[in-house]
Image: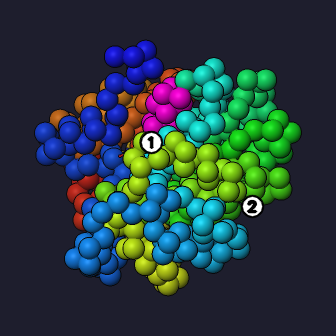
Amino acid sequence: HAQRLDGLGTTIFAEMSALAVRTGAVNLGQGLPDTDGPDSVLEAAVDAIRAGANQYPPGRGIPALRQAIVDHQRRFYGLEYDPDTQVLVTTGATEAIAAALLAYVEPGDEVIALEPYYDSYAACIAMAGGRRVPVTLRAPDFRLDLDELRAAVTPRTKVLLINSPHNPTGTVLTDEELRGISAIAVEHDLVVITDEVYEHLIYDGGRHRPLTAYDGMADRTVSIGSAGKTFSVTGWKIGWVTGTPEVVTAVNTSKQFLTYVSGAPFQPAVAGALALGNDYFDGVRAGLQHRRDLLCDGLESLGFGVHRPQGTYFVTTDIRPLGHTDGVEFCRMLPERTGVVAIPHQVFYDNLDAGRPLVRWAFCKKLDVLEEALSRLTKL
Ligand code: PMP
Ligand code: GLN
């Protein structure tokens, strides 16, 4: 195989989910909900198939979905977009990330990303021929050090790849951090790709602030969203990009030749989902916050060091209080010993030491599944 695939191996999510199936373990590894999204949304996809939405849809997405994305950005953030030129529907946020990096990264360009990073970032930067430059969010708070970010910029820096709410740490970037990122991007004329797929999963009354809304950002930002998390339909793979017409055209130029278009029958269903009332969005948040607290409290009483997340559906723990030091070894041992699967943070780092003692658990699961996992973990 080509050099660009060196070191990419198998995604940790596939490895750990296979291990869960093989050992019959409770899977708190991969972030996939065990309850599907609302019936009305599921029915809409079935209806769309019956009504004949089974051939290639328009390349940028069906008009109803592009309009629904525009309406969503206005309703939640007061942002205005033209549905014809400023919105692109993609095959999940994963494709949006790949297409955006391919659109902006020249071979040898540096891409600064917040570490730990979601594993497709490293792979897509490599496939685009870029060089990744990590800025590490460090335990216990996982805050962004703006001086460290500023120091990471070189004349080769092309792109900042930001993710908030952040997988796997659960950090939600503050207004001050976002202002700092914007100032650096403007000063060095950088493109900013911002992965905001967990925008609706923020707890304790916090709220999401889109990076593109900051001074000087609108014309340099590729904003990425997804239906998978908010509507618990991760298998549908419907995501989107919003930005200036130039940004959307650039990303679409590579998207066209990756997948051409994205899942026809899911698009009208996601359009309907985005228009659901506030009670839907509030309910998702409340349900997940309850699950977060159940899992965090349980892990705490088992002796883990728990970093309670502000957003996402992942909690990070430190395994050292339990006498373990290496998260990869711990996660390989865990299914056999206890019947539970989790994800080692280390796979999200270049600076392996920073992630070594950390383990991530997903709480987008039924309450009895979380309780079962906690009871199994007493075997540790
Ligand atoms: N970005 C982050 C930070 C994620 O956690 C995920 C979840 N897999 C994705 C992107 C991918 O989203 P999608 O399933 O829409 O491709
Ligand atoms: N985003 C999810 C996670 O981090 C799923 C990842 C995936 O399936 N590629 O677990």
Q: Is residue 344 visible?
A: yes
Q: Residue at x 37, y 74 (%)?
A: 269
Q: Nearer the viewer, residue 356 or 11?
A: 11
Is 204 on the left-hand or right-hand side of 304?
A: right
Please tell me whether residue 30 is drawn above or below residue 280 in the rendered image: above
Q: Can residue 320 be seen in the rendering of this structure?
A: no
**Which residue does the numbered mark 2 point to in the structure image?**
213
x then y, percent, for residue 352 = 50, 23
**Residue 59 drawn at (x, y percent):** 46, 57
- In the image shown, does 247 or 151 lie closer to the viewer? 247
Secondary structure of residue under mark 1: loop
Residue drawn 61% across the image and 51% down it: 249
Q: Is residue 375 left or right of residue 183?
A: left
Q: Is mark 1 within 8 Å of ligand 1?
A: no
- Mark drawn on residue 187: none
Residue drawn 83% across the image and 52% down it: 216
183 relative to 368, above or below: above
Residue, x 75% and y 61% (percent of image)?
213
Is the magenta region chiefly helix, strand or loop? helix
Q: Which residue is mark 1?
A: 257
Q: Is residue 376 left or right of residue 278?
A: left
Q: Is residue 335 above or below residue 200?
A: above
Relative horizontal placement of residue 36, taking residue 85 as reference (left or right): left
Magenta span contains residue 290: no
What are the residue bounds of the magenta stretch? 118-128
Q: Amino acid at mark 1?
A: Phe
- For the N terminus, the quadrant is top left
Looking at the rendering, in which quadrant would you find the C terminus? Answer: top left
- The secondary element bearing badge 2 is classed as helix
